[in-house]
Image: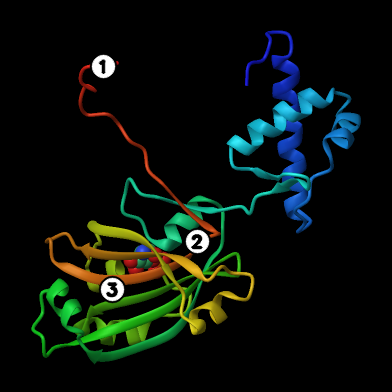
Amino acid sequence: MALSRRSRPKHSMLVQQLLALVQEIRDRGETCLPSERELGEQFGVSRVTVRNALAELEEQGQIYRVQGKGAFVSTEKFHQPLSSLTSFTQDMDSQGMVSGARILALETIPAPRMVAKLLRISEDSQVLLLRRLRSINAEPIAIENCYLPSHLGQVLQSHFRQDSSLYALLQKHCGITPVWAEQSFEVGSLFPWEQNLFGEKAPPYAMCTTRLTFDQNDNPIEYVESKYRADRYAYHVRMEAQHAYGEYRP
Ligand code: GLP
């Protein structure tokens, strides 16, 4: 979008005004933006200026436009930074959100073969399964199936509460600090019971992640399979180039 020097301040100001309007619309639980003509009248600018500002908001992911129907506010997404190991509670605290959890299961089960291998325990061992429905500002957002070595069972049974942070509890009551992890991501579908937990507005697919977390002694301490609502969750990573880009081949 090429803007003349003269129109730049007007454009930036309109972008800010539209961002505030987008937030107001979100707060009202609505999605539809007024038409370009109405926005032009409201902010005293031309339709071209409105169109350029809307294009910028679209680039930022704040709105999306549907041909013949108008502009709509995008659903706000929650962000998980990927550059450091954090807990769900920490991620939400840092964004000013209230994290919550409903414990769906906390039980000792025979270790599934793959889990035993990853946690480096024998195949006939038991593991602790902690299944939680995680929420953000009371909205269900993720289902986590967390497998932990069974010796942590007693501590969890006696100290763990619905909204407890697992990582904070491991550190405080078990002397275990989650230090690093390997995490993978892929798109997958939801089982009907999972879809029910997320509610009818949730799409039937999810961002599926696995995380294998290690403590300060490089011992695996949890293996987690999670499903995050794909329409509400986004991941963020900062990248830095390590190498030159080679020769330019025209
Ligand atoms: C994230 C990770 C899980 C981890 C959890 C701990 O959600 N994907 O692997 O178990 O954080 O979060 P909290 O300490 O809030 O319970």
Q: Point out which mark residue 224 bears.
A: none
Q: Position of residue 189 (x, y in %)?
A: 44, 71
Question: Label 3 amino acid?
Answer: His
Q: Secondary structure at mark 2?
A: loop
Q: Quadrant of residue 33?
A: top right
- For the residue pair 165 and 146, the one nearer the viewer reads as 146
**Residue at the outermost top position:** 5
**N-terminal-most mark, 1 or 3:** 3
**N-terminal-most mark, 1 or 2:** 2
Q: Which residue is mark 3?
A: 173
Is the residue at mark 2 in contact range of ligand 1, meaning its CB lies under 8 Å from it?
Answer: no
Q: Position of residue 200 (x, y in %)?
A: 63, 75
Q: Is 180 rendered above or below residue 167?
A: above
- For the residue pair 209 and 1, the one nearer the viewer reads as 1
**N-terminal-most mark, 2 or 3:** 3
Q: Which residue is mark 2?
A: 230
For label 1, the crowd category at 10 Å Cα-Cα, with few meaning under 14, some 14 to 19 and many 20 or more, is few
